[in-house]
Image: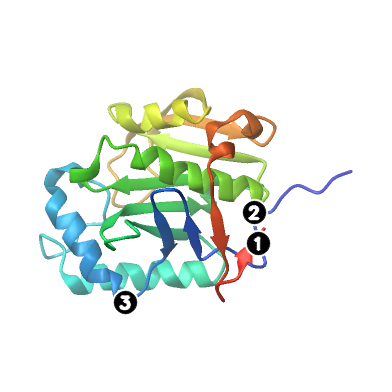
Amino acid sequence: MSTPATTAVTNPPYTLRTPRLLLRCMGPDDAARRKEAVDSSGSHLDGFFAPTPQEPMSLDAHAAQLRKFRAGFDLDQDRGYGVFEPETGKFLGEVSLLRRAGLGALEIGYWLRRDVVGQGFATEMASAAVKTAFELDRVLRMDLMCKPENERSAAVARRLGFTFEGRLRDRQLAPHHDRGDLLCFTLLAAEYPKSPASQLPLEAFDFLGRRLA
């Protein structure tokens, strides 16, 4: 009898490279870049971040969130990657692999700054996360949740071969999220080889910068 995947990797990738993007674990120097990306996006990112006393979020608030993300990353919990243009270092958004999906599974979450929407970056960074989850974390299932009105995220899920499982009523995944219905999409390990994500050219590197197979 086989043992289900636990989504615990002993040597997780800290850096990922795709044809157009650099995805990496974030550090202190990224707080200002993240603040600029969020501030410039205005209402486009409403609801993505926990509210703070300051509006827009202060640099210290961004730094506090990045410290929390880094702690989770280093403890092999949720892994949040900053997404950057390799040539310029421009902060494009974030993509996360979240453990709240249950045993042998991960949930993908992401956001993209407003001025680069519509250029295929969301699909590319989501593909990188999907490929990492199935090929390095060895998960059995991936979930993607989005609000019913978030047509772009639903389109990304379908583009990557996720199956629409249904509309989950009256859900709240994080304290700062508004309570409401969510659309649930899933991709299984047996379905992954036919997903466009499996064909994405991807390089992965560990904490020491060593290439991962």
- Measure how far apart labels 3 and 2 are at the Cα level: 27 Å
Type of amino acid at the residue the image marks with label 1: Val
- Residue at the disc numbered 2: 136
Image quarter in which the N terminus is found: top right
Element type where label 2 sits in the image = loop
Q: Which color scheme did the rendering employ for the protein? A: rainbow
Q: Nearer the viewer, residue 147 or 82?
A: 82
Number of marks drawn: 3
Above or below for 129 versus 15: above
Dot placed on the residue nearer the N-terminal end, 3 or 2: 3
Where is residue 121 drawn, in percent x and y? 35, 42
Q: Residue shown at 31%/30% (left/top)?
A: 152
Where is residue 125 drawn, in percent x and y? 42, 46
Can you tell which quarter of the image residue 211 is in?
Answer: bottom right
Tell me the tag on residue 28. Answer: 3
Q: Residue shown at 29%/70% (left/top)?
A: 30
Image quarter in which the C terminus is found: bottom right
Type of amino acid at the residue the image marks with label 3: Pro
- Residue at the disc numbered 1: 9
**Residue 146 left/right relative to 74:** left
Dot placed on the residue nearer the N-terminal end, 2 or 1: 1
Type of amino acid at the residue the image marks with label 2: Leu
Is any part of residue 200 visible from this angle? yes
Where is residue 118 drawn, in percent x and y? 26, 34
Dot placed on the residue nearer the N-terminal end, 1 or 3: 1
